[in-house]
Amino acid sequence: MTEAARGWLALQQDLGGDEVILDRPMVATPAASGWRKGAPPIPGPGMVITLPQLAFGGEPAWESLETVAAAIAECRRCPLCEGRTKTVPGEGNPSARLMLVGEGPGENEDLSGRPFVGRAGELLDKILALIEAPRETVFIANVVKCRPPKNRAPLPDEREACRPYLRRQIELVKPKVLLALGSTAAEALLGVKKPLIELRNRVHRWDGIPLIITYHPAALLRNPNWKRPAWDDVRIARQLIDSDS
Ligand code: URA
């Protein structure tokens, strides 16, 4: 959707409407809209479209984790949609005190639609058990919701396309503590690129929420020496969960 169209819809919503009936196409031609085969239809004359709730900044304010997941399932904002088997929106306790953010789905996650179900996931479960925060008590999301080809790190445009989903998920879960797993998650949440060793072992903030950064479980599988510092990091997260503030 173009900025102009988005702004116009936001205005309609401010005026109290939740539906709009178009009297002319919103874009002149399919090509002009960037429409591709398989994408949702271009709004045309007589079509009734329901206005999404638009948050400040023009992004839809999905009202629940389920509506975020539904939007992700339909998402064609970046080329990763072409290669996905399933979207992996994230899952867990919708009012978790601890929310984890990984990088993006791998092969097992792409096939199952669930985050961290491969070997890295098994290690993550063990780490969570150590701090008595089993998987069912936390919420686990990723920076991108579709698998990048050959498990490469998501590109800046792909992260950007997924950013509203992660932001809204955090806003809806309202965790007491965020735990970023690996440098992609750290960069996405902090907005700066730095070596992980400089970011771990301290408390950052994401919109006021304490944010701990540690190694990605897949990195721990490759470098078992990092398990000890990762353990220190998750213990800081545990202390923050238990603190009164
Ligand atoms: N790695 C991630 O970053 N996320 C997953 O969901 C699985 C593996």
Image (tube, rainbow, N blue to C red):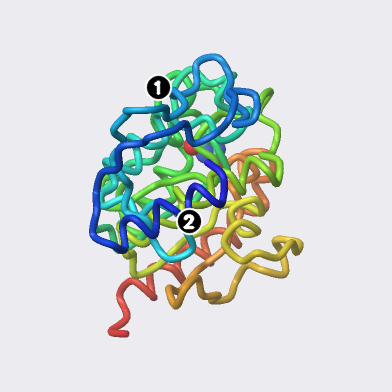
Q: How many marks?
A: 2
Res 197 → quadrant: bottom right
Mark 2 belongs to which amino acid?
Gly
Q: Residues within 10 Å of mark 1 (few under 14, many from 20)?
A: some
Q: Name the residue located 48 percent from the left edge and 40 percent from the top edge.
A: 123
Residue 179 percent across, percent down from the top left: 48, 60
* Along the line of sight, the residue nearer the viewer: 42 or 126: 42
Q: Residues within 10 Å of mark 2 (few under 14, many from 20)?
A: some
Instruction: Tell me which numbered mark, 1 or 2, is placed earlier along the sequence.
Output: 2
Residue 25 percent across, percent down from the top left: 47, 31
Residue 66 percent across, percent down from the top left: 26, 41
Q: Name the residue located 26 percent from the left edge and 44 percent from the top edge.
A: 19
Q: Identify whether 10 is placed above or below 111.
A: below
Which residue is most to the bottom? 245
Q: Dot 2 corresponds to which residue?
A: 7
Q: Which mark is residue 112?
A: 1
Q: Identify whether 118 is placed above or below 232.
A: above
* Along the line of sight, the residue nearer the viewer: 135 or 90: 90
- SS under mark 1: helix
Which residue is most to the top? 37
* Along the line of sight, the residue nearer the viewer: 67 or 211: 67
Q: Name the residue located 23 percent from the left edge and 59 percent from the top edge.
A: 16
236 lies left or right of 215 = left
Res 241 → quadrant: bottom left
* Along the line of sight, the residue nearer the viewer: 26 or 136: 26
206 lies left or right of 32 = left
Mark 1 beta carbon near ligand 1 (under 8 Å): no
Residue 120 visible in the current orientation: no
Mark 1 belongs to which amino acid?
Ser
- SS under mark 2: helix
Q: Which mark is residue 206?
A: none
